Image: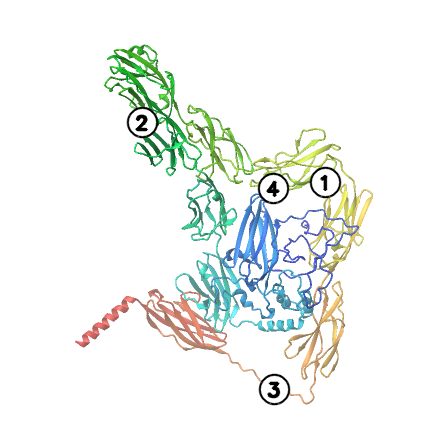
């Protein structure tokens, strides 16, 4: 015998069996709470003790739900934990006036879920509202990152009366599920009896003002509690959405008053009149054996096949769509006729096929509603994070799965629309949807979200102020009288204007002063410099808090008498008169050394790099280890020698200019200049330092990650470019993206940085730039991809479940916050009191929420802790409050009998019995069962015992299983016992000795004896029937008669009656009735007429064709028909053959039969359809066959025949 199993709720004490209720369409469980409250069903709810209040002028206030019964002294409260719902806020039932708007809100906390929750909204039992979004229905979803709460909203706009009904909200996340029911009441005074069931599937309003494609979703005929009650009616508590009329149709007549009382129906007479009218309307269709279902649902792009079954296989069928006949054009609609079945196939369903379809056979028709459900639109390409400057254009682009699908844009949870300023523009390009912001401002920073009915995507937009970069600053100048002074600077923005100042006074343009601005270059030119032009010159860009300064030095030349020969002289550092000087140049810029010299005659200038300058000839330098580079300029200013093509040396009157185009690092070093003439020579040393941007750092390393942050570290660059590194700039990007986003604009001085504002669960990469006074290096290599996740919170509810001398059982609940990373498992550790050495209880991690730790030492005092692990590491530990002593605690045995078993348990024969009896006691007690003082046999029942309960299981109950069952739980000398009474009931036997005791007037008295077998329960009544011997059609006289005799009245004079009686108990009617052996004749006052006997005439006739088939010749491509007529009684069965092959099921042929005339229609025949066609008629009296030949001619033959006829006419006219 298989192992018995527990039933949910059988072991819970203090519960009772709920009253029988009707099935509720669309609800997951029928509970005692109102449907509007939507609480999840965790067990049966006791029925209210008081009956409903009587009708009054004012509707009574809704009564509070009954409080659960308090446990008795012997009862033990149930300590087992119930399942926790996923909803933090459930949608509540609401009321709305016609034409107004109402919103239902549901909230789900993400902390306890491993995956984003999915929410569905339903109306009634099966109607999914996701595909019905439009004019009257809108679904919204928002997420708060701080509180981790998802908010789901369903908004009904411009409510109508038929929107009232029961709704359901379902939320699921992996293996977790929760459901909530709620009601919508639309306030509009209308009588329930005037409700038209056809309005539930009407697609257009009566006045025709609404769009034909809009679904008027409405449930079937429901309780009147969803409509505003009329004045004087009793307002009952809104229970589950039930169909009262369906219950009344199936219920016996004696239960009508009870059902009306349960559902708050006070007008019992009106209810019976309407029910009688409804039953009269239910008549069997003469044309249809099987009609269409009330509604069908199909996804867009799929095909659907509508099928009906007609009574007449030759019946003609017409299909209508929204009242218009469907024509068989193309491959969209396919009509099929197979025997009595008729099919309509609709291929590639679109929204245009969402309509009402009708099948018409003669005068009868059946209608159905086809709902085409659009597949959810998903986002194929997500939005990407962007970082732009103020004033730049922003384009956020995504790609969806369906072209032209509607999307919704939101910024920080607020929907974006086209406002009057046209700040936001929405563009559609095929599958692409683009949000355009023409000129970004700081207010545009935030998270932008695009939503479809099948998904969403989020991206972050960061807008930064532009930093003006200086590409070239102005330099100090030293000029002589009547020379030109030229200041030049270059900035990064071409649109930036600026102002020039001299000693704090604005410089105005004049005939000698010129101010120009071309692109990014700003120039100030002073012609014919005078001593008054000497001073500090400053350039201030507009809108920025910095300036560029330089000094103009005026060199006054004194003219003295100089002899004919003047020794050469180098004039360096006119201000400081210092020979040693260092010049700094940025790599890539031009190095220009302008050295003033004097001497008469004009001296020869020699430039040397790599050695000290001296008065010796350049050849002496060859004796050194490395030959220096040298450049020589003669007195005519021409270059005598040139060591590099980038180097240019030129000499003018009183100046020698040394230029290097595009300075490089190897140009750094000491330069010597020597000037010679016959009167002597002079030398000077100039040090040149070339500075550059630093080398890129190495790839950064991710040290740690958090929920929305990470800590990265990197090493300084190997070469700093000749200038100290002042900081670093970092960038990040999503792994699947190509757009890098800068994290800081001001250089960050340290080599460790914490990046924040990331999205948990998304992979990122990082890279670094080094910055010195010259500029920014190239970026480093990208770091290894990483995912920001945070450890989970500590497990909650850690407690001891059980303990023995060597084992302990612990249990806990899942952490409140799990995060985006999947929970990998739990680690359980323990340590002895007074030590800090934690020992793992198991190798690796466990995935359960309860463990049993074995092999512990008796008497040890241990501390226990549990930590949850994910990819970010362990969570904070959950600890027990104090040390636990490993020692079993003695407990007396105690049996907890469930409340439903404290009374006699009644079961029907054939039903299964599964009794779960919980008990307590330590150590494990001994359990024994007995029935009526005798031990139970293993062949009769199955027993299973555990540490906490015992199960008695009987697969199929029999009458012999009735009795008193005794349970005994024993630990050593301590015993606890309990008794359970089981009664197995069956159908009663038939009553006995039914006889007619008296007949008078229109009455007959009958009596009988009670059945020998009452089915192991009391007989509650008898069902008495009568029948006229002419028709033998039985009619009920009494449905539940208490006594064993009765008087049948109102009999018809002249008829002879027989009677039968059936016994009734709580199981049902007896299988066989007890019939009266004799009959009762109601005599007439007068003579009796005896009708003569006539021989019945045989009207049968063998099948015979009265008009044969006629051979025909037809043109290919035009429909052809073959006709004949047949007669016969009974109606013969007709079969058509072509070349002796049955063609009844061929779609090319259509067969008709009307008043004995048989027609075979051949649709657009071709030459292959020619041949011998046979019609065979068969009935019980005989059969007959006729045949003919059909010739199908091609179109060419027809044209040739026309030509010949035309030629004959022309010849005749000649």
Q: Which disc, if any, is residue 817? A: 4
Could you classify mark 2 by the number of other residues whose Cα lies within 10 Å: few (under 14), some (14-19), or many (20 or more)? many
Residue that mark 3 sits on: 1092
Q: Which residue is labeled 2 in the image?
A: 529
Discs 2, 1 touching: Cβ within 8 Å: no
Looking at marks 1 and 4 on the same chain, the residue that comes earlier in the sequence is marked by 1
Q: Is residue 1002 above or below residue 200?
A: below
Numbered badge on residue 239 = none
Tag 1–tag 4 contact (CB < 8 Å): no
616 above or below 152?
Answer: above
**First along the sequence among labels 2 and 1:** 2
The residue labelled by disc 1 is 802
SS class of the residue under badge 1?
Answer: strand
The secondary structure type at the circle numbered 3 is loop
Q: Which residue is drawn at 55% across and 47% down?
A: 143
- Can residue 349 be seen in this snapshot? no
Q: Is residue 93 left or right of residue 315?
A: right
SS assignment at label 2: loop
- Separation (CA) of disc 4 from disc 3: 95 Å
Nearer the N terminus, badge 2 or badge 4?
2
**How far from the left and from the top, in percent, is residue 288?**
52, 69
């Amino acid at each position: 015998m298989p192992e018995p199993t527990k039933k949910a709720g059988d072991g819970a004490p203090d519960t009772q069996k709920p009253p029988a209720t009707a099935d509720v369409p669309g609800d997951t469980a029928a509970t005692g709470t109102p449907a509007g409250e939507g609480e999840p069903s965790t067990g049966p709810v006791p029925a209210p003790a008081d009956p409903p209040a009587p009708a009054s002028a004012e509707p009574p206030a809704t009564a509070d739900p009954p409080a659960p019964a308090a446990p008795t002294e012997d009862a033990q409260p149930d300590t087992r934990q119930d399942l926790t719902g996923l909803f933090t806020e459930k949608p509540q039932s609401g009321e709305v006036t016609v034409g107004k708007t109402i919103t239902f809100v549901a909230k789900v906390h993400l902390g306890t879920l491993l995956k984003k929750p999915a929410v569905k909204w339903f109306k009634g039992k099966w109607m999914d509202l996701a595909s019905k979004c439009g004019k009257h229905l809108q679904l919204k979803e928002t997420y708060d990152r701080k509180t981790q709460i998802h908010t789901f909203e369903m908004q009904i706009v411009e409510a109508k009366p038929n929107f009232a009904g029961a709704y359901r909200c379902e939320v699921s996340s992996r293996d977790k599920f929760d459901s909530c029911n709620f009601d919508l009441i639309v306030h509009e005074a209308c009588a329930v009896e005037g409700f038209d069931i056809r309005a539930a599937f009407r697609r257009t309003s009566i006045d025709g003002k609404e769009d034909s494609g809009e679904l008027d979703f409405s449930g079937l005929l429901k309780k009147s509690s969803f409509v505003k009650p009329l004045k004087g009616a009793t307002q009952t508590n809104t229970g589950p959405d039930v169909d009262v009329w369906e219950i009344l149709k199936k219920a016996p007549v004696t239960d009508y008053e009870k059902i009306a009382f349960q559902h708050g129906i006070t007008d019992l007479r009106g209810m019976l009149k309407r029910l009688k009218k409804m039953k009269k309307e239910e008549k069997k269709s003469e044309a249809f054996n099987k009609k269409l279902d009330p509604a069908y649902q199909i996804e867009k792009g799929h095909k659907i096949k509508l099928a009906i079954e007609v009574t007449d296989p030759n019946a003609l069928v017409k299909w209508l769509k929204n009242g218009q006949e469907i024509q068989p054009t193309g491959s969209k609609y396919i009509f099929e006729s197979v025997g009595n079945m008729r099919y309509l196939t609709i291929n590639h369903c679109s929204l245009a096929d969402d309509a009402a379809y009708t099948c018409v056979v003669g005068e009868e028709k059946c209608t159905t509603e086809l709902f085409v459900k659009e597949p959810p639109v998903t986002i194929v390409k997500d939005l990407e994070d962007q970082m732009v400057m103020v004033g730049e254009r922003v384009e956020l682009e995504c790609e969806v799965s369906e072209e032209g699908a509607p999307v919704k844009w939101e910024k920080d949870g607020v929907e974006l629309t086209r406002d009057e300023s046209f700040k936001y523009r929405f563009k559609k390009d095929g599958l692409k949807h683009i949000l355009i912001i023409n000129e970004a401002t700081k207010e545009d920073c935030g998270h932008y979200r695009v939503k479809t009915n099948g998904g969403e995507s989020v991206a972050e937009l960061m807008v930064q102020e532009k930093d003006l970069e200086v590409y070239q600053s102005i330099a100090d100048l030293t000029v002589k009288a009547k020379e030109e002074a030229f200041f030049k600077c270059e900035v990064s923005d071409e649109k930036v204007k600026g102002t020039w100042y001299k000693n704090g006074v604005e410089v105005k343009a004049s005939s000698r002063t010129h101010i120009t601005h071309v692109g990014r270059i700003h120039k100030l030119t002073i012609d014919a410099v005078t001593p008054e032009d000497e001073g500090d010159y400053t350039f201030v860009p507009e809108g920025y808090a910095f300036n560029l300064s330089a000094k103009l030095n005026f060199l006054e030349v004194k003219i003295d008498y100089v002899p004919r020969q003047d020794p050469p002289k180098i004039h360096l550092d006119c201000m400081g008169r210092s020979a040693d000087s260092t010049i700094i140049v940025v790599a890539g810029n031009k190095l220009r050394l302008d050295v003033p010299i004097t001497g008469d005659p004009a001296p020869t200038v020699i430039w040397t790099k790599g050695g000290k300058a001296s008065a010796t000839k350049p050849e002496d330098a060859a004796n050194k280890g490395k030959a220096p580079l040298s450049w020589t300029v003669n007195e005519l200013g021409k270059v005598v020698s040139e060591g590099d093509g980038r180097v240019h040396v030129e000499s003018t009157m009183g100046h020698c200019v040394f230029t290097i185009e595009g300075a490089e690092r190897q140009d750094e070093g000491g330069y010597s200049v020597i000037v010679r003439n016959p009167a002597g020579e002079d030398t000077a040393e100039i040090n040149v330092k070339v500075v550059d941007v630093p080398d890129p750092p190495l790839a950064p390393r991710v040290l740690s990650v958090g929920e929305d942050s990470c800590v990265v570290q990197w090493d300084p660059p190997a070469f700093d470019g000749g200038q100290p590194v002042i900081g670093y700039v970092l960038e990040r990007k999503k792994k699947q993206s190509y757009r890098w986003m800068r994290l800081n604009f001001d250089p960050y001085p340290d080599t460790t940085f914490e990046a924040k504002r990331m999205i948990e669960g998304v992979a990122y990469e990082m890279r670094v730039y080094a910055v010195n006074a010259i500029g920014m290096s190239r970026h480093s290599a990208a770091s290894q991809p990483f995912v920001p996740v945070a450890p989970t919170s500590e497990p909650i509810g850690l407690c001891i479940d059980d303990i023995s001398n060597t084992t302990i059982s612990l249990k806990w609940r899942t952490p409140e916050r799990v995060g985006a990373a999947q929970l990998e498992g739990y680690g359980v550790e323990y340590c002895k009191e007074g030590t800090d050495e934690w020992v793992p209880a198991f190798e690796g991690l466990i995935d359960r929420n309860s463990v049993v730790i074995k092999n512990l030492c008796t008497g040890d005092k241990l501390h226990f802790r549990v930590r949850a692990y994910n990819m970010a590491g362990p969570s904070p530990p959950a600890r027990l409050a104090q040390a636990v002593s490993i020692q079993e605690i003695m407990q007396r045995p105690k049996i907890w009998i469930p409340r439903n078993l404290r009374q006699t348990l009644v079961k029907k024969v054939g039903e299964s019995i599964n009794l779960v009896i919980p008990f307590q006691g330590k150590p494990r007690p001994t359990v024994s069962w007995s029935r009526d003082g005798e031990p139970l046999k293993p062949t009769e029942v199955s027993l299973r015992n555990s540490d906490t309960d015992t199960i008695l299981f009987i697969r199929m109950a029999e009458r012999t299983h009735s009795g008193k069952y005794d349970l005994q739980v024993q630990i050593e000398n301590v015993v606890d016992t309990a008794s359970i009474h089981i009664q197995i009931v069956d159908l009663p036997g038939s009553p006995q000795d039914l006889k007619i005791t008296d007949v008078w007037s229109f009455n007959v008295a009958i009596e009988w004896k009670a059945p020998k077998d009452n089915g192991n329960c009391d007989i509650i009544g008898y069902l008495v029937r009568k029948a006229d011997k002419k028709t033998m059609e039985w009619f009920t006289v009494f449905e539940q008669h208490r006594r064993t005799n009765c008087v049948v009245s109102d009999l018809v004079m002249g008829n002879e009656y027989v009677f039968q009686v059936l016994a009734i108990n709580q199981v049902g009617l007896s299988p066989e009735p007890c019939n009266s052996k004799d009959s009762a004749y109601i005599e007439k006052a007068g003579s009796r007429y005896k009708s003569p006997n006539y021989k019945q005439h045989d009207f049968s006739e063998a099948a015979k064709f009265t008009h044969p088939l006629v051979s025909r010749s037809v043109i290919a491509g035009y429909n052809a028909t073959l006709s004949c007529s047949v007669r016969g009684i009974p109606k013969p069965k007709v079969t058509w053959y072509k070349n002796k092959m049955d063609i009844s099921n061929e779609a090319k042929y259509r067969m008709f039969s009307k008043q004995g005339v048989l027609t075979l229609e051949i649709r657009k025949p071709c030459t292959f359809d020619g041949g011998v066609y046979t019609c065979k008629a068969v009935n019980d009296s005989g059969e007959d066959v006729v045949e003919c030949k059909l010739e199908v001619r091609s179109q060419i033959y027809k044209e040739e025949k026309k030509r010949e006829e035309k030629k004959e006419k022309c010849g005749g006219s000649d």
